[in-house]
Amino acid sequence: MNLILLGAPGAGKGTQAEKICEKLSIPAISTGNILREAIAGKTEMGLKAKSYIDAGKLVPDEVVIGIINDRLKEDDCKNGFILDGFPRTIPQAEALDRMNVRIDRVIDIEVADEKIAARLSGRRVCLKCGATYHTEYKKPVTDGICDVCSAELVQRKDDMPETVLDRLKTYHEQTEPLKDFYAEKGILRIVEGQQEVADTTALTFKALED
Ligand code: AP5
Ligand code: MG
């Protein structure tokens, strides 16, 4: 199955991508994680992306379209994939159409803006393997250390409250129109994402089946 996860920053796309990945054994592809890896590795693309990400703005379309175009050609995508954080603009969605990739479902995880800041301020991430934790809702076994690879957990710079407001603004202006784009194709499913993670996962799995 080829899937797209839509939703505001902090809606739980990454969290649900991980659950679907476990259930269906298909890779979860996060453009955010790929860009953060590039920043950590100080590559040319990373240096270019950093200022946009830190300001809560979108990285230019051509950069992320190039990332996805390359990534979807890899062998592990043959039996399906989950796109977490791509597309995020209409031109990105149109570019995906031009890649001749069939999309089976678009799951939009809905969470009110008021809930987002609290979720994101408690998030801690592993820059080495991309695993995500929360100081309240998903604690690692050892405080500040990744359960998966034992690297140190950090707070994302763009999870600071002022930047979260900018990211939400960007989301409403540039990404939310994708809901209509995919509703018109008949493949959009809305999932209520305000309850506990397990509740959202149950609704997400149900949305994959109908
Ligand atoms: P990206 O990393 O994709 O960030 P985002 O979309 O803003 O989404 P988040 O990762 O913040 O949220 P999420 O929905 O994955 O939430 P999570 O599951 O972690 O992108 C970062 C930046 O890169 C962008 O701002 C942009 O600059 C650039 N970029 C990326 N893709 C791009 C593109 N296509 N085009 C242009 N630029 C691009 O959950 C959040 C927290 O809440 C976690 O701590 C989690 O544990 C917790 N949580 C999750 N679910 C629940 C729940 N049900 N109850 C309580 N807590 C929960
Ligand atoms: Mg994420």
Image: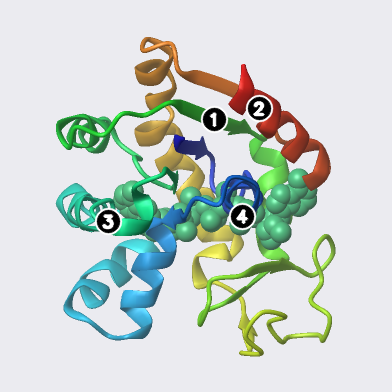
Foreground tag (2 vs 4): 4
The answer to whether residue 169 is above or below residue 75 is above
Label 2: how many residues lie within 10 Å, few (<14), some (14-19) or many (20+)? many
Q: Amino acid at mark 4?
A: Glu
Q: Amino acid at mark 1?
A: Ile
**Rendered image: mark on residue 18:** 4
Foreground tag (1 vs 4): 4
Disc 1, SS? strand
Q: For mark 3, what is the residue? A: 59
Foreground tag (1 vs 3): 1
**Residue closer to the observer: 67 or 58:** 67
Label 1 close to label 4 by CB (< 8 Å): no
Q: CA distance from mark 1 to mark 4?
A: 14 Å
Q: CA distance from mark 3 to mark 2?
A: 26 Å
Q: Which callout, 1 or 2, points at the residue further toward the start of the chain?
A: 1
Q: Amino acid at mark 2?
A: Val
Q: For mark 1, what is the residue? A: 107
Measuring from the top left, give residue 108's x and y in whole percent. Answer: 55, 30
Q: Which callout, 1 or 4, points at the residue further toward the start of the chain?
A: 4
**Rendered image: mark on residue 191:** 2
Identify which residue is drawn at 82% across, 71% down: 139
Placement of the C terminus among the 4 image quadrants: top right
Q: Which callout, 3 or 2, points at the residue further toward the start of the chain?
A: 3
